[in-house]
Image (spheres, rainbow, N blue to C red):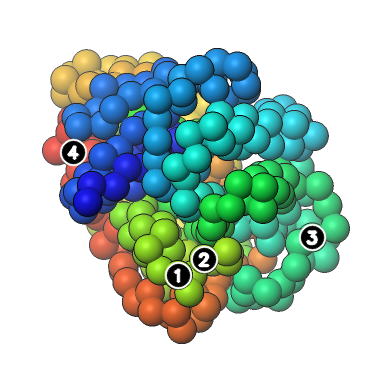
Amino acid sequence: MVRTALVVGASGIVGNATSQLLLKEGWTVYGLARRPSAQKQILSVTADLQNAEETALALHDVRPDAVFVTTWARQESEAENIRVNSAMVRNLLDGLRPGQSTRHVALVTGLKHYLGPFEAYGKGTLPETPFREEQGRLDVENFYYAQEDEVFSAAERDGFTWSVHRPHTVIGQAVGNAMNMGTTLAVYATICRETGRPFRFPGSSSQWNGLTDMTDANLLAKHLLWATDTPRAFNQAFNVVNGDVFRWKWMWQRIAGWFGIEAAPFDGTISPLSDQMDSDAAIWRDIAKRDKLVEPDIDRLASPWHTDADLCRPIEVVTDMSKSRRLGFNEYQPTDDAFFGLFESLRKNHLIP
């Protein structure tokens, strides 16, 4: 029997990886976006999730077995993040309710569940690392919590099962994504190579010297499908990381080597990419023109603000995966291989030279 999925945010890093895995596994895949991009074999659904009537109309004939919520809309304040993103989830699930087909909803959030929203990121009293799912919510407003509550409420009302997935920083390919460390570092390294600027780590000593982990988009996609198909994983929240740990002082050298440049020595000074790359738009346009790259707009590729938020944290951040392991999810992805795979894909698709 062919199963049907609705992927919300199908053109994003996580949504694209999830859609491709579902197609490979024989699912029919609908991809919902406000401005869908043409993706082979994915059935486009156009809707602004902030508009309840428009969403309901767009979903009238869509009958998914499973729904994968992999997107959010960044706002100027956390109060607005909560208002907008909770409404998007609510409108989505309300729009699907008349069809009565949905049996599982998988929601992708992240480690801001433990670290707090951007307004209070990594500040105040935080849980000890490694982060574990049983650690409760922080005593601070957070749009991830609001999204979860919308899923929980609709599940109780409509009878579907759910899963919440909390990745660390995600490595994967997408253009126009607001949180894209891998492509940001690829663009930065390329500019450093082309201009002779030092490839300087932008973050804190805590991140340079401390342990950390990350999440490959393809591994996250496998985790989403696993939780959808595994009854013992129903109605639970999970951390999702690659399974290895590293220090940035090691990874920075690895990334530099892939691009054929030297990593600059780190003296403990924070040098945000948002400052380092502030005037690089014209440089990237010239590189793109010379090498016939498909995306000359640096803002469509790089998100320095988000990379800075991760790499400037004042604390070591590692994530426990024991809950998933105990329930049978044993996928593993070395993080340096995840970076290198992304860089190779970016080059193959003419996004970097």
Q: Earlier in the sequence, mark 4 or mark 1?
A: 1
- Residue at mark 2 to residue at mark 4: CA–CA distance: 39 Å
Could you tell me which quadrant the C terminus lies in?
top left
The vertical placement of 200 against 196, above or below, is: below
Query: What residue sits right under mark 1 in the picture?
Result: 231
- Residue at mark 4 to residue at mark 1: CA–CA distance: 40 Å
Percent position of residue 336, x then y: 31, 63
Q: Which mark is residue 234?
A: 2
- Residue at mark 2 to residue at mark 3: CA–CA distance: 24 Å
Numbered disc 2: secondary structure: loop
- Mark 1 or mark 3: which is in front? 1
Q: Earlier in the sequence, mark 1 or mark 3?
A: 3
Q: Residue at x 83, y 52 (%)?
A: 140
Name the amino acid type tagged 3.
Leu
Query: What residue sits right under mark 4 in the picture?
Result: 347
Q: Which mark is residue 138?
A: 3
Q: Is residue 93 visible?
A: yes
Q: Residue at x 34, y 77 (%)?
A: 330
Q: Are marks 2 and 3 in contact (CB under 8 Å)?
A: no
- Residue at mark 3 to residue at mark 4: CA–CA distance: 41 Å
Of residues 101 and 269, the one nearer the viewer is 101
User: Is residue 334 left or right of 270 when viewed as pictured?
Assistant: left
Of residues 93 and 305, the one nearer the viewer is 93
